[in-house]
Image: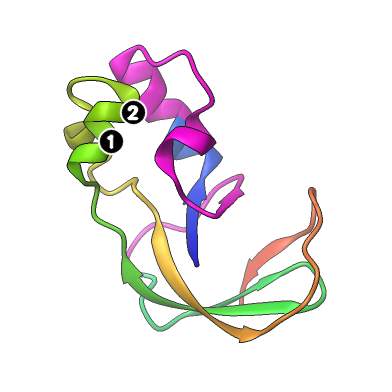
């Protein structure tokens, strides 16, 4: 599963002039308000009261970002493209649920 920060999507969209649905265009599974800076690989995060994920990798932006957002998106997504994660504990996630690093 993949995660991205809404704050980063807004920054990228503004930088390239994208006006559409940035979460859909970026193709990440889950969008949270913000993500901590730095390398999150190996960190566990909780989504809501049930779900626990372990960050496995940084998701490098691919050429699809330029196709979906417009020219310059790949560069604009540098360090903002989100993270891949493995599901440690399944459960329900609802809009507005808390996100926290464990």
Q: Looking at the rendering, in which quadrant would you find the C terminus? A: bottom right
Image quadrant where residue 98 sits: bottom right
Q: Which residue extends farthest bottom?
A: 88
Residue at (33% x, 24% y) in the render? 69
Q: Secondary structure at mark 2?
A: helix
Q: Residues within 10 Å of mark 2 (few under 14, many from 20)?
A: some
Q: Which mark is residue 68?
A: 2
Image check: 62 left or right of 97? Answer: left
Task: Give yes or no for residue 35 being in the magenta stretch.
Answer: yes
Front-most of residues 18 and 39: 18
Q: Secondary structure at mark 1?
A: helix
Q: Which mark is residue 82?
A: none
Q: Is residue 92 above or below residue 11?
A: below
1 and 2 marks in contact (CB < 8 Å): yes
Image check: 90 left or right of 14? Answer: right
Residue at (26% x, 38% y) in the render? 64
How far is disc 1 from disc 2 in space, using C-alphas? 5 Å
Q: Is residue 69 above or below residue 42?
A: above
Which residue, given by chain and number where applicable, does mark 1 sit on? 65
Residue numbers of the magenta segment: 10-38
Q: Where does residue 61 sit, x and y in percent of width and height?
A: 24, 47
Task: Give yes or no for residue 80 being in the magenta stretch.
Answer: no
Image quadrant where residue 13 sits: top left
């Amino acid at each position: 599963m993949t995660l991205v920060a809404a704050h980063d999507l807004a920054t990228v969209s503004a930088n390239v002039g994208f006006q559409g649905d940035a979460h859909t265009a970026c193709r990440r599974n889950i969008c949270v308000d913000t993500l901590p800076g730095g390398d999150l690989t190996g960190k566990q995060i909780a989504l809501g009261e049930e779900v626990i994920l372990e960050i496995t990798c940084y998701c490098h932006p691919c050429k699809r970002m330029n196709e979906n957002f417009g020219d310059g998106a790949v560069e604009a997504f540098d360090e903002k493209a989100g993270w891949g994660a493995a599901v440690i504990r399944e459960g329900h996630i609802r809009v507005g649920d808390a996100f926290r690093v464990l």
